[in-house]
Image (tube, helix red, strand yellow):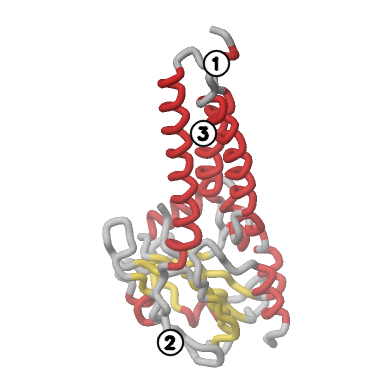
């Protein structure tokens, strides 16, 4: 197979688009500096966009061995890439904001109600215990309650 | 949570105990903590009772349509008073451990 026949910018652009989407959730989400604003992924999307543009030009060039197929394939994969990019932007900047307002949550300066919940060994633990059980032999200054959606 | 685990020594030094709360069962939380190498306390609010009492329920947002906790962090001092809150407006934007440690450093024991 002749290397000139392969539309490598198109295929690498499409692969990079998929990578730009997936790496956020599997890699960049773990680092605050790349999670809070997904700049690393947006950079990857831009590079992918340049490659896809090159791929499209190549796909529509007159010297292609199968001009019609080449046009269709490059159009479809460019469009698919655009959909992946749109989905990413939507998930991060729109979907991410779908959170309840939680107006009734404890306010600054308020006392929070005590509660008791089982830990990973099934033992009931109260907030009061968490606030009084020593850390490294010293009385704790406080507790950081971290509510999260759960393991998935 | 990974940030908390990385800063756990600092949290201990300052005297702040991090506690994670979700609707996961104790078994799932144990598996989660083990897999990720988390060593701080995980509590299981299976029926989202505490989550609801704190008005943090995200209705029907669980995988099976159950109510789950929206992400939220509260720093509670030894008297049980809220000293710092983070109710993020975007799921992907979270508080950093340094922010909590800064506030914690100003708390008396």
The residue at 58%/28% (across/down) is A9
The residue at 62%/60% (across/down) is B3
Of tags 3 and 1, the one toward the viewer is: 1
Instruction: Locate residue A7 relative to residue A99 in the image: left or right.
Output: right
Which of the marked residues, 3 or 2, is nearer the chain's N terminus? 3
Q: Is residue A68 visible?
A: yes
Image quadrant holding the N terminus of chain A, namely top right
Q: Is residue A123 visible?
A: no
Which of the marked residues, 3 or 1, is nearer the chain's N terminus? 3
**Would you name the residue on which mark 3 appears?**
A14
Question: Between A121 and A45, which is closer to the camera in this rendering?
Answer: A45
- For mark 2, give the secondary structure: loop
Image position, residue B65 (x, y; %): 27, 61
Q: Chain of mark 1?
A: A
Most extreme residue toward the left, as rendered?
B65
Give the class, few, some or many, for how many residues have Cα within 10 Å of label 2's Cα (few <14, many ≥20).
few
Question: Between B4 and B16, which is closer to the camera in this rendering?
Answer: B4
- Is residue A53 shown above or below A84? above
Mark seen at residue B63: none
Q: Chain of mark 3?
A: A
- Find residue A54 and report its image quarter: top right
Mark seen at residue A63: 1
- Is residue A152 shown above or below A7? below
Gap in angstroms between the C-alphas marked 3 and 2: 52 Å
Question: Between B27 and A27, which is closer to the camera in this rendering?
Answer: A27
Question: Between A112 and A72, which is closer to the camera in this rendering?
Answer: A72
Q: Chain of mark 2?
A: A
The residue at 53%/39% (across/down) is A17
**Would you name the residue on which mark 2 appears?**
A113
Gap in angstroms between the C-alphas marked 3 and 1: 22 Å
- For mark 1, give the secondary structure: loop
């Amino acid at each position: 197979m002749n290397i000139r026949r392969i539309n490598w910018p198109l295929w690498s652009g499409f692969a990079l688009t998929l990578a730009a989407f997936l790496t956020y959730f599997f890699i960049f989400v773990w680092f605050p500096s790349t999670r809070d604003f997904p700049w690393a992924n947006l950079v990857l999307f831009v590079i992918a966009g340049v490659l896809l543009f090159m791929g499209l030009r190549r796909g529509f060039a007159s010297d292609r061995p199968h001009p019609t197929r080449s046009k269709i394939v490059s159009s479809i994969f460019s469009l698919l890439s655009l959909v992946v990019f749109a989905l990413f932007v939507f998930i991060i900047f729109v979907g991410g904001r779908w959170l309840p307002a939680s107006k009734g949550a404890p306010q600054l300066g308020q006392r929070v109600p005590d509660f008791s919940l089982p830990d990973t060994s099934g033992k009931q633990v109260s907030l009061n215990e968490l606030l009084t059980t020593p850390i490294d032999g010293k009385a704790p200054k406080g507790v950081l309650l971290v509510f999260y959606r759960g393991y998935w | 949570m990974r940030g908390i685990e990385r800063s756990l020594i600092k949290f201990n030094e300052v005297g702040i105990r991090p506690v994670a709360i979700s609707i996961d069962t104790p078994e799932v939380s144990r598996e989660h903590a083990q897999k990720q190498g988390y060593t701080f306390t995980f509590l299981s609010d299976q029926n989202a009772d505490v989550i609801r009492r704190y008005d943090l329920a995200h209705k029907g947002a669980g995988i099976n349509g159950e109510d789950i906790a929206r992400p939220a962090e509260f720093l509670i001092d030894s008297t049980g008073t809220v000293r710092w809150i983070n109710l993020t407006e975007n799921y992907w934007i979270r508080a950093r451990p340094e922010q909590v440690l800064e506030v914690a450093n100003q708390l008396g024991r």
